[in-house]
Image: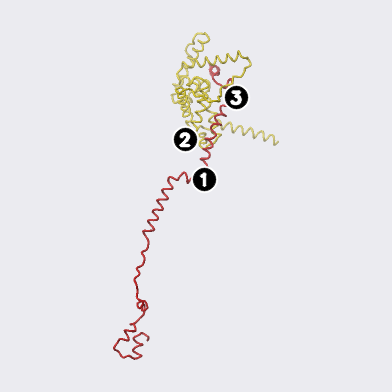
Amino acid sequence: MPFLCLILNKKAHFRVRVSALIETTDGELVRAALEGQTRAFGILVSRYMRPAYLVALSITGNSEDAEDVSQEAFLVALKRLGDCRDVERFGGWFLTIVRNRARNLLRRERLRRGEELTPEISPGPGGPAEDLKRLEIREQLENGLEGLSEVRREVLLLHDLEGWKHREIAERLGIPDGTVRSHLHFARKHLRDQLGAFHGSAPSGEES
Amino acid sequence: MNDLDNRARLEPLDPGSEDPGFWIRFHGRVMAQARDELARRQMAGEWNLTEVVFQWRKTLVPMTLLAATLAGIFVLGHEEPEPFLSPIALEEALMEDLVGDPIPTVLGREAQLDEVAFLTGAGGF
């Protein structure tokens, strides 16, 4: 019986932790992080690490720079957390930091740290041929995205890869909802055409 | 094309799709680098009396000096003047509060010098 209670307690504790992760607002987390609460800052990092990476990727165009920029942006944001006037809009404020740092990186010579987080392309079940194919697809995607404007790349990646809703993107990028939809529409069409060209198929028509 | 297809198409851009541990390492790296700053913020939130005074030193020191100066002026401005001491002759001091004329005056009168006159003049009766 005590063992069962322990399991139930653990499950309840896990539910509390998960609900805290989902339900706690950015503002609450920012206020706690301002007081140095590690857990609150950790949740913010979990919440924004992918969007930060994707925004950085949409500007730098390569994964290594996107990693560097997004990691540094978290540290810069933590140091300047007191400057975030509207803590409930932390997301938009933070992504602006990411964007600015990515643009600065493009202007400067590329800075590299000794240790990198380059994804280890572990040998897949398909063997070296499959790995090569995956690498090729990624390069095609990166090339396809190059033809898009910065904001369209951001919208496309945040919506299709990160799963943010139009409204969330509009809030955090500071643009109208309709503009987000428009950017997404044209970005998808452009990418489809580009990938179609790579694969030798005809460009697609207008998106329904 | 639905959302899942769109996501699948872009998935190779997500480093976590090839390396499942990527985001865990990413998170760990950020948290490790943020440790010092978070600790500093925690310390800043736990001020003791000395730190409070230190934080308020720019206000406290001038205010204390001003208060001390004002107190000094107040105390000095209300100091009682020392009483004027004039030299007193020994004879005056001895005769102070005595009723009647001094003995030499009594003795100098033209009145009869008898015991009664003397005693009456000296205030004995």
**Chain of the residue displaying label 2:** A
Q: Looking at the picture, tell me which residue is in the foreground, A108 or A20.
A: A108
Q: Looking at the image, is B125 positioned above or below residue A155?
A: below
Which label number is shown at residue B21? Answer: 3
Residue shown at 56% from the left, 15% from the top:
A135
Of marks 2 and 1, the one in the foreground: 1
Residue at image position (34%, 91%) is B114
Q: Which amino acid lies under the numbered mark 3 shown in the image of this protein?
A: Gly
Chain that bears disc 1: B
Which tag, 3 or 1, sits closer to the chain's start? 3
The N terminus of chain A appears in which quarter of the rendering?
Answer: top right
| Residue at the image point whose x is 47% and y is 26% from the top | A101
Q: x and y percent of residue B35 in the render?
A: 55, 34
Chain at tag 3: B
Q: Name the residue under label 1.
A: B48
Q: Name the residue under label 2.
A: A82
Between B98 and A183, the one nearer to me in the picture: B98
Give neighbour class at mark 1: few <14, some 14-19, many 20+ (Cα, 10 Å).
Answer: few
Structural distance between the alpha carbons of marks 3 and 1: 42 Å
Quarter of the image for residue A174 reads top left
Q: In which quarter of the image is residue A6?
A: top right
**Mark 2 and mark 1: span between their CA atoms?**
22 Å
Which amino acid does the dot numbered 1 rest on? Asn
Q: Position of residue B47 (x, y in %)?
A: 51, 43
For disc 3, the neighbor class at 10 Å (few under 14, some 14 to 19, many from 20) is: few
For mark 2, give the secondary structure: helix
Q: Neighbour class for label 2 at 10 Å: few (<14), some, many (≥20)?
A: few
Same-chain check, marks 3 and 1: yes
Colour of chain B as rendered: red
Q: Which residue lies furthest to the left in this view?
A: B110
| Colour representing chain A | yellow
Residue B61's x, y, as percent? Answer: 43, 48
